[in-house]
């Protein structure tokens, strides 16, 4: 039987920087890797991943909804890991503040967008960000299905 894990994440930009999280080495999921901010969708949020995303951003960074502009769903990543299907809703937006709180998940850091490809990330996030760099002006929602070290891309039709 397959269970489903639903998560949201956000790439928040401020000028030429993006807010990234270096996950603690003691975390179960992606220990020591760099990630966007985000986390698990709670039961009452399943019909609105954006609500989950705003909550996760506030919990992990202290950045509030009114300090974020243009938060937009850009990617839905799917991956099967053993008997679990992971759904990851990835949003992109702009933060009008650079002030962040200490995070239980690891260390938050503003990173130059030009240096992002040098960070050690999960392969699915790396491939997603490379796709984003190739399609920065796209207003489509992209789906990415990850397996065997590669991502298959599709677009949700409007």
Image (cartoon, rainbow, N blue to C red):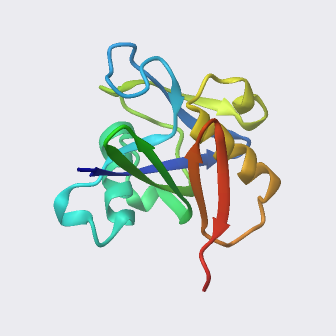
Nearest the camera: 99 or 157?
A: 157
Residue 77 coordinates in the image, percent (x, y): 52, 54
Q: Quadrant of residue 124?
A: top right
Q: How many marks?
A: 0
Residue, far left: 44
Query: Where does the C terminus fall, quadrant-wise?
Result: bottom right
Q: Residue at x 54, y 63 (%)?
A: 69
Residue 149 coordinates in the image, percent (x, y): 64, 35
Q: Residue at x 29, y 72 (%)?
A: 47
Nearest the camera: 60 or 131?
A: 131
In the picture shown, does residue 141 fall above or below 57? below
Q: Is residue 18 left or right of residue 54?
A: right
In the picture shown, does residue 21 fall above or below 61? above
Residue 143 coordinates in the image, percent (x, y): 58, 62
In the picture shown, does residue 153 fall above or below 139? above
Q: Residue at x 31, y 23 (%)?
A: 28
Residue, far bottom: 158
Nearest the camera: 61 or 153?
A: 153
In the picture shown, does residue 114 fall above or below 107? below
Residue, far top: 25
């Amino acid at each position: 039987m397959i269970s489903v894990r639903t998560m949201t994440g956000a790439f928040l930009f401020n000028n030429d920087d993006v807010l990234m999280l270096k996950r603690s080495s003691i975390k179960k999921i992606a220990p020591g890797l760099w990630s966007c901010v985000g986390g698990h969708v709670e039961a009452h949020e399943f019909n609105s991943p954006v609500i989950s995303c705003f909550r996760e951003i506030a919990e992990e960074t202290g950045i509030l909804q009114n300090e974020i502009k243009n938060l937009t769903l850009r990617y839905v990543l799917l991956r099967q890991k053993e008997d679990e299907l992971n759904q990851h809703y990835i949003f992109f937006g702009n933060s009008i503040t650079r002030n962040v709180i200490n995070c239980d998940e690891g260390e938050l850091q503003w990173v130059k967008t030009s240096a992002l490809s040098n960070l050690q990330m999960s392969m699915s996030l790396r491939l997603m960000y490379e796709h984003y760099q190739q399609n920065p002006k796209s207003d489509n929602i992209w789906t990415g299905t990850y397996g065997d070290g590669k991502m298959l891309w599709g677009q949700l039709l409007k």
